[in-house]
Each structure stands twice: as structure tokens, then as C-alpha cells.
Image (cartoon, rainbow, N blue to C red):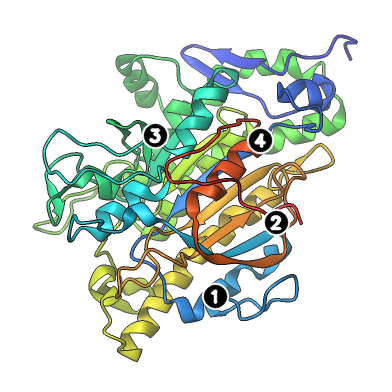
Amino acid sequence: MFDRPISRRRVLRGLGVAVSLPWLEAMGPLSAWADQPSPAKAVPNRMAFMYVPNGKNMADWTPSEEGADFELPPILKPLDRVRDQLLVLTGLTADKARPHGDGGGDHARAMGAFLTGAQPRKTDGTDIRAGISADQVAAAHLGHLTRLPSLEIGCEQGAMAGNCDSGYSCVYSSTMSWRSATQPLPKEVNPKQVFERLFSTVPDAQRVERDRRRKSVLDFVREDSRDLEGRLGSGDLRKLDEYFTAIRDIELRIDRAASLSSAEPPEGTAAPAGVPGTYEEHIRLMCDLLVLAFQSDATRVATFVLANEGSNRPYPFISVPEGHHDLSHHGNDQAKKAKIRDINTFHVRQLAYLLERLQSIPEGDGTLLDHAMIAYGSGNSDGNAHNHDNLPILLAGGGCGTLKTGRHIRYPNETPLNNLWVSLLDRMDVQVASLGDSNGALKNLSG
């Protein structure tokens, strides 16, 4: 063992590859690893925003009880094992998703205003405008501390131009992250490309050659890792082995998806390139990449769009062959509402998968979930009514001890959703006077 701590910025390098490391005891105190101005934080806080479209069946989403003694309603039942890590937040409103004289386009406005709190300009041309999103406010302040300032991922490709919703550009309904009012950040839906962003430093031509040789990124850093392993204790060696195993598992799943997609597709359909064959597998692979990004400190800020706003994806694998958007206009038909509930529950199961993965990874005196804030929800409430008040919003994770979870909190009607984002930014040590239509920080999150 060496007396001198290993730098928390140490990466394993090989030909065109850089593999960041998780926190190890040999790096010294976690407080040194965090690089945060707040002495109260012993580890870096992480923040991710997950978006699902078309609202919810709110009767099966909203707990009837407030406080700590609430019962999980049907849609939230998959979260039972992480219930004590949840905050269910009722009463929040995305006012700028409302028409305000602009007529139709609630789906485009719902996503465009979700993290910005700004009214998207109604246009299907190039003169798009919304506002800077909460994730990019954090990235601007903290991005220099990590390899990637932020990570934008999703599971449904979306156009960045054209008319997708009543005269609104497609960019609004497919993009959650905005670096500036006029600069949307497109999401990456191909897991292989996300993996390359996290670990590769080579140009495309060399990357193709590496793929041809079918080598793992771990093969390229093996010599550097042997040197590192000689400086580690048994606990760190076990943690490093688990981390490498997770990386290799994701590589194998990406390779399997690519090989399966190379088969001849049915006539009239196009084979995906590197995207898993099933929607659930796609979501979970992206979840694992997000976990890996946080675990390796490749980034501390992420957005994840499970499906674009207004998505009409069918869900035959849960016995819902109809399109999601079509069903969301249920006209109070109970059979259609039951199918919406089933779609909503499917999405929440994927959230549960992510949270349980984060909770399974030890870090310091807690877990990765203890040191993260995962916001989940939609800019629409009831998809039939296209209303943007009383939104379905969940917040999970400990926020490095700054959140008192295991509660349902009901806020006064018309409380701006962006008040929540201001509060999360504060917990990332990013202080802003306001964001979009916020009028203050959201109270009671700490108890």
C-alpha cells in the first residue's frame, strides 16, 4: 500500500480509452473527492431528471394520505422497496405549458417548459426559443469538475425540426435540455454512443477499428489497472471488480443488441443500430449507463426522456396494443383509463429499477442513491384534459442528507414546478435567484 492517496481524478488509460474510477478508500476522505464548496457535503451530489409523456391516470397516482403514513397507490406500487427514499409532491404547476393565447400545442409546451419554466415560442421554423433548463444551469456551474458537464439520454428518437404539435417545432416535444433559450441539446438514444461518450477518447475511425477487433475498453486499460490494483486494499479491490463487471456487462448487452439488430427485418421496417430489440431492455440499459456515469463521476447532471411528449408508442408487451397518446384522450372511458394506468405502472417499474440499482452501490457511509436526487414526472397531468397543474412529480434519493424522504407533500395549488428545480440546484451548491417562472424555493423538502 502507498501512503500517498490516489488522486480522485485518476483515470485508467489505454489506446484511445479513459475509464474514470469510482470513489475508493485509497483516494482519501470523500470530502476531498467531492470538490464542493459546502463543508456539509462529504460526497458529490448528483441530479437527474426523468420525463414520461402524456400525463397520468391521476386517481391511481396520487396518495390519499399526506405525510409519512401514506399508502402507495396502484401506479406507485413498484416503488415499495424504495418507499423510504421517495417524496411524492402534489400541487406543482407548469404554468408556461399553458396556452396563454397560443392555442393548441400542449404536448410541445409541456416538455419545452418542464425544466425551463419558460413559454416556448410557437413556431415550426428555425426561430425556436424557450429558456435555459435547470440541468444546464447546474452544468454551467459544475461541469468543469467532471469529464462530461451533463448527459442527455432517451429511448425515443425525435426530430429537431418540422411541425409536430399544432404549429410547434418537433424540437419542443423531443428535447428536455436547453443550454440557452435558443440552443436545445438533443438526447442520445443509442446506448453504444452513450458508452463511447463515457469512456472513449478516440476519433471515429479508430473506434471502428477497435470494434472490429471486438475488444473491451477494459482490455485497453488492463496494464494501467494492474498498477493501480497494487495500491489497493481488499475492500477497494472488491469495489473495483464490481465496477469493472458492470462496465463489461453493459458492453456485452450493447454488443448483443447490435448483433440481434443485424438480422433481416420484416419487410417495411428498419433495423435499429445498436438499440436493444425491446423497449424495456432499452430503458434498463440506459438506466445502467446512467448509474455508471454517476458511479464513475463522469457527470453529476443528467436528463432521461423515456418517451417523447405526445408519443403514440403502443405497449403490446403489457397487453396494451393501442397508442399511448390515443389512449390518453380517454374521454373518461374506464377501460382506456385502466390501460393508461398499466402504461404508467410500466414506466414506474423502470424508475424502480434505476433507484434499486443506485441503492445497491455502496459509497462512503451510504449508497449512490443517498448521494443523488432523481426527479421523475411529466409536464402534463391528466392527458385527456391537457392540464398542467397538480402535476405527477416524484423526487427520490437523499440528496447527500438534504432531503427528508418517505413522505407525500401536498403544496398549494399553482405552486410553480420551477420552485422545486431552484431547491434542487441549491442542494447542488448552485444558488440562483430565480429560474423561469419560479417565485422562490420549495419548502418542506428537508422536513
The x and y percentages for residue 155 are: 36, 50
| Distance of label 4 from label 2 (alpha carbons) | 36 Å
- Front residue of this view, candidates 206 and 35: 35
- What residue type is disc 4 on? Tyr
Q: Which mark is residue 243?
A: 4
- What residue type is disc 2 on? Asn
Graded by Cα atoms within 10 Å as few (under 14), some (14 to 19) or many (20 or more), the crowding at tag 3 reads many
**Residue 384 visible in rendering:** yes
Q: On the rendered structure, is 121 left or right of 295? A: left
Q: Residue at x 65, y 48 (%)?
A: 358
Q: Which mark is residue 62?
A: 1
- For mark 3, give the secondary structure: loop
The x and y percentages for residue 24 are: 78, 27
Q: Quadrant of the N terminus?
A: top right
Figure check: 217 above or below 294: above
| Distance of label 1 from label 2 (alpha carbons) | 18 Å
Graded by Cα atoms within 10 Å as few (under 14), some (14 to 19) or many (20 or more), the crowding at tag 2 reads few
The x and y percentages for residue 258 are: 33, 42
Ranked by sequence position, the earlier of labels 1 and 2 is 1
Foreground mark, 4 or 3, reads 3
Q: Which mark is residue 132?
A: 3
Figure check: 190 above or below 3: below
- What residue type is disc 1 on? Thr
Q: On the rendered structure, is 239 left or right of 108? A: right
- For mark 2, give the secondary structure: loop
Residue marked by disc 2? 444
Figure check: 242 above or below 277: above
Ranked by sequence position, the earlier of labels 4 and 2 is 4
